Image (spheres, rainbow, N blue to C red):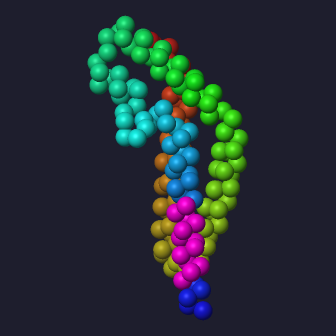
């Protein structure tokens, strides 16, 4: 009996980690322009670090805007699948959270809830930040 409980716990923790990894990966894929990729700086940071002249900045922005448009077009067919995966991942995450809470003390359950809420607030802030960067800048 104890062995099956251990296996169940390992499975749940594995599902929790896999869900988190899937969510993290999907977030990075969908918001790559904002965060940069593979440790490389974002285009905005690159432009600042390169100390571009106004003329270079206009050309730089034009090239990077074209790239962004091309990449969005490439990812567009996958967005419905990513949305479906996100919904499924949420259901799995909610289920895993509830299952984990069942094995925790009430105090630990409160801490787990707080950790989850902090993660959600960070994700919401990131989503707001991403939506703000998608609006065209009029001051350039």
39 to the left or right of 33: left
Q: Is residue 6 above or below residue 133?
A: below
Residue projecting furthest to the bottom: 1
Instruction: Characterize the magenta stretch by its predominant secondary structure.
Output: helix
Residue 44 screen position, x and y as percent: 39, 26
Quick one: 66 or 105, which is closer to the camera? 66
Q: Position of residue 124 (x, y in %)?
A: 54, 44
User: Which quarter of the figure has residue 2?
Assistant: bottom right
Residue 103 x/y as whole percent: 55, 79
Q: Quadrant of the N terminus?
A: bottom right
Residue positioned 49% across, 36% down in the render: 32
Residue farthest to the front, as pictured: 74
Vertical order, 133 against 21 (above or below): above
> Can residue 14 be found in the magenta stretch?
yes
Towards the viewer: 58 or 111: 58
Q: In the rendered picture of this protein, how many numbered marks are placed on residues?
A: 0
Residue positioned most to the top: 55
Residue located 29% across and 21% down the image: 50
Direction from residue 94 to residue 50 in the image, left or right: left
> In which image quadrant can residue 6 be found?
bottom right
Regarding residue 56, the answer to whether it shows in the image is yes
User: Start and end of the magenta stretch?
Assistant: 6-18
The residue drawn where x is 35% and y is 26% is 46
On the question of residue 113 being in view, the answer is no
Residue occupying image coordinates x 51% and y 20%: 65
Q: Quadrant of the C terminus?
A: top left
In the rendering, at what x and y percent does residue 72 appear?
60, 29
Q: Quadrant of residue 43?
A: top left
């Amino acid at each position: 009996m104890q062995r099956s409980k251990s296996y169940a716990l390992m499975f749940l923790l594995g599902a929790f980690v896999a869900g988190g990894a899937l969510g993290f990966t999907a977030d990075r894929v969908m918001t790559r322009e904002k965060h940069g990729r593979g440790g490389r700086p974002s285009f905005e940071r690159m432009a600042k670090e390169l100390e571009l002249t106004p003329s270079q900045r206009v050309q730089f922005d034009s090239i990077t805007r074209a790239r962004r448009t091309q990449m969005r077009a490439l990812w567009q067919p996958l967005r419905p699948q990513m949305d479906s995966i996100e919904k499924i991942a949420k259901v799995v995450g909610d289920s895993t959270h509830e299952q984990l809470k069942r094995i925790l003390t009430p105090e630990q359950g409160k801490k787990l809830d707080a950790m989850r809420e902090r993660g959600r607030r960070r994700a919401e802030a990131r989503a707001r930040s991403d939506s703000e960067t998608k609006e065209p800048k009029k001051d350039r």
